[in-house]
Amino acid sequence: MATGTGSDQLGTGSRGRPPKRIALLGATGSIGRSTVDLLLRNPEAYSVAAIAGGRDHAALARTALAVKAEFVAIRDEDGYAALKEALSGTNIQVAAGREAVIEAATREADLVVSAIVGAAGVEPTHAALELGRVVALANKECLVCAGGPFMRTAQQKKARLLPIDSEHNAIFQALGGEDVSRIEKMTITASGGPFRTWTREAIEAATVEQALNHPNWAMGPKNTIDSASLMNKGLELIEAHHIFAVPAEKLDVVVHPQSIVHGLVSFTDGSVTAGLARPDMRVPIAHCLAYPERIETPAPRLDLVALGALTFEKPDLDRFPALGLALDALREGGALPTVLNAANEIAVEAFLSGRIGFSGIAREVEKALEAALKDGTAREPATVEDALDIDHIVRERSRGALAMNQASGMLTLQ
């Protein structure tokens, strides 16, 4: 974990201190909405310097008004006029486009919540790190796409990353400040998704509706599909490698259907600590918002007696090959995680739009990894710009391959 500027700069507005200033990137997504819920429940502890969103100008306007944001940015420039109109008569500043989102990320703030989904979140989040900000990170792509450059920037600028993902947040809390050299193994858990007990043949024939029917978590479509394929666990292992500076061989994943235990740390003396909570993203978000203190949340409380039992299983890489591909990319390193992430995003888009079947996601990702190894695209990115260039190349190549297969009639819904 990159060390930061010190907990004394992380006041929560309690005990007479001024409110903590928040910049919220991805304000209208699932993580953004949960963050807003907590901000509204603690109005004296937080003020909102800026919010940013993608295309939903109506939701962005409602959010800006609710949290009394000083500045609001919308990535889609076509939504600027409608957003401006919705906020007319207020003192809220409005801007649109890529630069506007970066401005939102770099406004004076005590904490930047990075919850933009996909590679679009990489540039603004890195801009916040460049200023030495404390960043609560929910965007997987920042570390999967450009983990090396990101962590180097955090170290050089004395910025700090606080993990919002439930698994990484649980591990962060379970570590308790221990030196990572004392760690024997770090384990994240997977719910197993909607297809945990399905046969390989049934998974291959799964529909979009079935893949989106997650048993435990309410997430956006892309993250939900990643959970169904277990790709999300592979991405999270790559993140953990960068966040906690732990080598691949010390990272593990187990399937835990109840989604109560989110992460475990095994130490060299044989002891194990774990982070447990009911599956509610407001728990890790609240931890990051208030860190190093605590705020109350409306999340359901954990009752182990009522649960009765917690079970664990080994992931099946035959039925869930996407996880195996991610593990290979983590072990091989270089830009393979960048390639994996970009190809997966394009493949998930294709599945959601009905152009490929569920099992086609892993196949398209595997093709992209093989192509990158052949043509040198898998080289280690030296900077965030390098990583984004590789990301762009892989996305265009993946889109082209899908279009070519579809045009030639070779693409099947498998």
Image (tube, grey):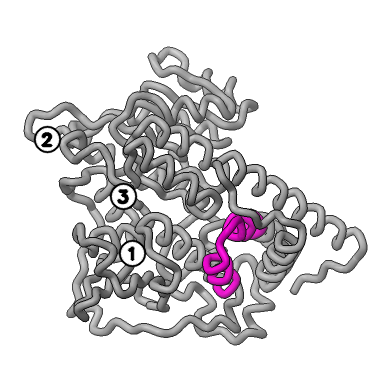
Residue at the far right in the pictured view: 408
Q: What element carries label 3?
A: helix
> Measured from the top left, where is residue 367 in percent x and y?
74, 66
Label 1, label 3: how far apart the Cα atoms are: 12 Å
Residue at image position (34%, 34%) is 133
Amino acid under disc 1: Pro
Vertical placement of residue 379 versus 95, above or below: below
| Element carrying mark 1 | loop
The magenta segment: 323-344
Residue 363 or residue 210, whichever sits in front: 363
Q: Residues within 10 Å of mark 3 (few under 14, many from 20)?
A: many
Q: Which residue is drawn at 23% across and 32% down?
A: 20
Instruction: Identify whether 296 is placed above or below 230.
Output: above
Task: Give how far apart the Cα atoms at labels 3 and 2 are.
Answer: 18 Å
Give x and y (percent) for residue 54: 55, 36
Q: Where is residue 407 in the image (x, y as percent from the top left)?
A: 90, 58
Residue carrying label 2: 14
- Disc 3 designates what residue? 285
Q: Earlier in the sequence, mark 1 or mark 3?
A: 1
